Image (cartoon, rainbow, N blue to C red):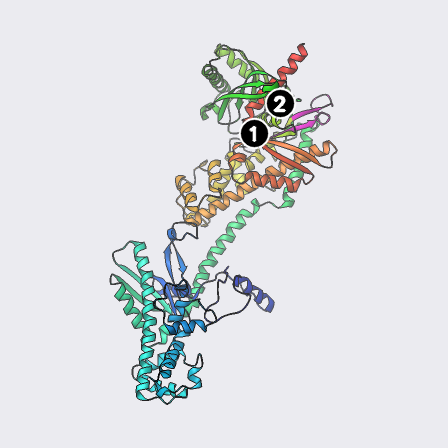
Amino acid sequence: QSILVTWTKGFKCSSVEGRDVVSMLRKSIKKRGDFDIDIVAVVNDTVGTMMTCGYDDHNCEVGLIVGTGTNACYMEEMRHIDLVEGDEGRMCINMEWGAFGDDGVLNDIRTEFDREIDMGSLNPGKQLFEKMISGMYMGELVRLILVKMAKEGLLFGGRLTPDLLTTGHFETRFVSAIEKEKEGLQKAHEILSKLGLEPSHEDCLATLRICQIVSTRSASLCGATLAAVLRRIKDNKGVERLRSTVGVDGSVYKKHPHFARRLHKTVRKLLPDCEIRFIRSEDGSGKGAAMVTAVAYRLAAQHKARQKILEPLKLSHEQLLEVKERMRIEMEKGLGKETHEEATVKMLPTYVCSTPDGTEKGDFLALDLGGTNFRVLLVRVRNGMRRGVEMHNKIYSIPVEIMQGTGEELFDHIVHCISDFLEYMGMKGVSLPLGFTFSFPCQQNNLDEGILLKWTKGFKATGCEGEDVVGLLKEAIHRREEFDLDVVAVVNDTVGTMMTCGYEDPYCEVGLIVGTGSNACYMEEMRNVELVEGDEGRMCVNMEWGAFGDSGCLDDFRTEFDLAVDELSLNPGKQRFEKMISGMYLGEIVRNILMDFTKRGLLFRGRISERLKTRGIFETKFLSQIESDCLALLQVRSILQHLGLESTCDDSIIVKEVCTVVARRAAQLCGAGMAAVVDKIRENRGLDFLKITVGVDGTLYKLHPHFSTVMHETVKQLSPKCEVTFLQSEDGSGKGAALITAVACRIREAGQR
C-alpha cells in the first residue's frame, strides 16, 4: 500500500493525491483484462537504488537520486522511528528531501532566480530544495541568469531572442555539454546560436562560467545534505570512523562531467572522519524494487502460511450458530430424565429456588473453593433501613501437592484455613451457619448435600469423587475438634455469582464464570427439570457446560492445538469446551501454535528454545497484557523476554496476533453458549423479547482487554430477540453462597414457626 502524498517533478494528474497508487494500478490492470500481476511491494526509486547497489556492496546503507528530481534514503535505527512500533534493528527511511526548505529554513541562501523558478512552477512554495539542485530546474536557472545579464547589457550585446525568453528552452543537458573539458566552448556557441543569438567568444566563456556556478552549487548543496545523513548514521552507530557506501542514480549524477566529483569532494571535506564510497546503480532502481519484492514475497508467503494455520480458529457467524444449536441440544439432554445419563452438559439441579427478598439478616460464614486460591469469608447481612452486606475475607493458597494428594489432606487444609480465619476475626468457638461455594461438578439431592461427580481445574485429590463434600468437610471439622459449623448450603461458584448480582439486580437470572475454568447456571422452569419432582416455580440449574463436547459433538471445531492441549492435560477427553475457552488452557493453546510456527520457520527464526517447550509458561495474565491496546511492541517483547523467549519486533507482532485469535475464539464460543441459554429462557416463557441480566465473574472476563466486548457482541448477534445486560460480580461468589445460606435460614426459620 502506498498513499501518494504529493506529486513532484512536474506531474499534476488529478484525483491521485491522497489515494493508494497500488489500488489504482490494480484497477487499471483489471480494466485491461488481458493479464494479472500480484503487486507485492511499492518502493521509492531511492530505496530501489540502495537495494540494487546493496546487492553488490553490503556496506551500502544510503540511496541517492540526482536526476529530473532528487531524493535520498538511508537505514535508520528502529528506536528512533516513532511512527513505527518496535525498537530493534533498522528500517529504510525515504527522506523526501526535495521538500527541505519548504518551511523557510533555506530562504537566506535562495536567490532571485530560485524564487522566479518557484513562482513559475506547477507547485509554488513546494519542493524548494529540489528546485535548487535537480535536473528539471538546473537549465532553467542558467537561462534566467543569461536573460538578466543580457537585459543589463552584460551579454550578447544586450540582445534577447524569443527562444532565450521561452521557459524550458535551455535544457539541463546543455549545461552538461557546455561544461565538457575540450568541446565545452564549441558546444556553448552551437547551443546559443540555436537560441537565435550571435555569441562572441566572451559570451561563450561567460555562459560556461554560469553553468559551472549553477552545477557546483547544486553538487555542493547535495553533498552538504548527504553529509548530514552520513553523520547521523555515524552517530547512531557510535563508531570512531564510519565506513559506508552510497548507491547513486540519476541523469545529473551520471551524465554531468563534473557533478559527481564535486559532490564527493564536498562530502569528504565535511566528513574527514568517514570513508565514504560511491557506487553507481548501473541497473536503475528496478533491480532494487525486484529485490524488495523478492523479500516481501517471502514474507508474504510466510504470512499466508501462518494465516492458513490460524484459519480453523477463526469462526464464522454460521459456525457460531451451529455451536449455539448444539449447546441447546445438549442442554435438553441434561434436563431430561431419560437422556440425563448420556448427557455431557449435566444440567444439575441446585435446589436454589429463591432469591433474596430483603428480609434476610445475620452473620454467616462462607467458603469459596474453585481454583488454586481458597477464600474464607464472614458475611454480615442487614435488612430494613440499613439493608446491605458487609464482608470480611482472607485468601489462602492451596499447594499443588494438596490439590493432587488425598481428600483427607485437602479437607484438613480447608479446615485449618477456617480455624486461622476465625482466630484472625476473634471468633474462635462461635458456631455460625455456613455456605460452601464448591466450584466442581456435583449432584445435589438437597441444598446441603453435594456429591462430587469429578474433579476439574487440575484437582486430583483421591477419595472424593462420588462422595458428599459436605460430609467430607464435617468429618475434617470433627477431626480438628476446635469448633462446630452448621453447613446450610453447598453451591457452585456460578450460582454464587448469580445470587451476588441478583442482590443488586432483580433481573439477574443467569450466572457465568470465565476464569481458571468456565461454567454457567440459570433459572430453569421446574417443569423442565425432570430430575426433580414438581413443576411449579423455577430452580437454578448448574449447567456444568465445561464438559460440552465430551461426546464428540464439537470435534469438527477442535483444532490440532486443542487436541495437543487435551492430550497432555490431567483429564484427557474431559471438559473439552472448557479447554477451548477458559484461562487455564488458552495460554497452552497459544504456546502450541507458537511451537508449530517455529518448527515451520515462521517465528523466532525457526529456533525452538527449551523455554518454549515448557508447558504452562503462558499464563492468562500474559495473554491479557500482550493484547492490551496501550502496550507498545517494545513492552510485548519485554514480556516475551521475561518468559525467556528472545524475539524480534516482527515476532512480537505475530505472538500478539496469535493471542488475539485464540482469545477471540474463546470469547465467541462463550458467547454462543450464553446465546443458547438466554434464548432457552425466552422460549420457556413464551416471550417475543426477553430482557435479562447475566452475573459474571472470573479473571479472564475481568482482566482481558477484549474478551468481554467480543462475547457481548456474539450474544447480541446470535440472540437478537434478547436484551442481555452483563453485570460484573465485584464480591466474588462467596457473597452469593452466604446470601443463599441467609435465604435458606430465613425459609427454615419460617418453617419452624
- Give the position of the C terminus as an image quadrant: top right
Mark 2 or 1, nearer chain start:
2
Q: Quadrant of residue 671?
A: top right
Q: Would you name the residue on which mark 1 appears?
A: 729
The answer to whether mark 2 and mark 1 are in CB contact below 8 A is: no
Mark 1 belongs to which amino acid?
Ser
Q: Where is residue 8 drawn, in percent x and y?
A: 46, 68
Mark 2 vs mark 1, CA separation in Å? 25 Å
- In the image, 699 versus 323, the foreground residue is 699
* Residue 650 versus residue 724 in the image, above or below: below
Q: Residue furthest front?
A: 152
**Residue 282 seen in render:** no
**Residue 352 seen in render:** yes
The structure residue drawn at horizontal position 48% and vertical position 39%, both measured from the top left corner, is: 623
Q: Where is residue 336 drawn, in percent x and y?
A: 70, 28
Q: Where is residue 450 drawn, in percent x and y?
A: 60, 20
Magenta span covers which residues?
Answer: 518-540
- In the image, 662 versus 226, the foreground residue is 226
Front of the two marks 2 and 1: 1
The structure residue drawn at horizontal position 44% and vertical position 79%, both measured from the top left corner, is: 168
Q: Dot 1 lies on which element?
A: loop
Q: Dot 2 lies on which element?
A: strand
Q: Residue furthest right?
A: 686
Is 188 left, or right, of 322 in this rendering? left
Q: Is residue 575 magenta?
A: no
Mark 2 belongs to which amino acid?
Gln
Q: Is residue 525 magenta?
A: yes
Mark 1 crowdedness (10 Å alpha carbons): few <14, some 14-19, many ≥20: many
Q: Would you name the residue on which mark 2 appears?
A: 443
* Residue 9 versus residue 576 in the image, above or below: below
Q: Where is residue 711 drawn, in percent x and y?
A: 59, 39
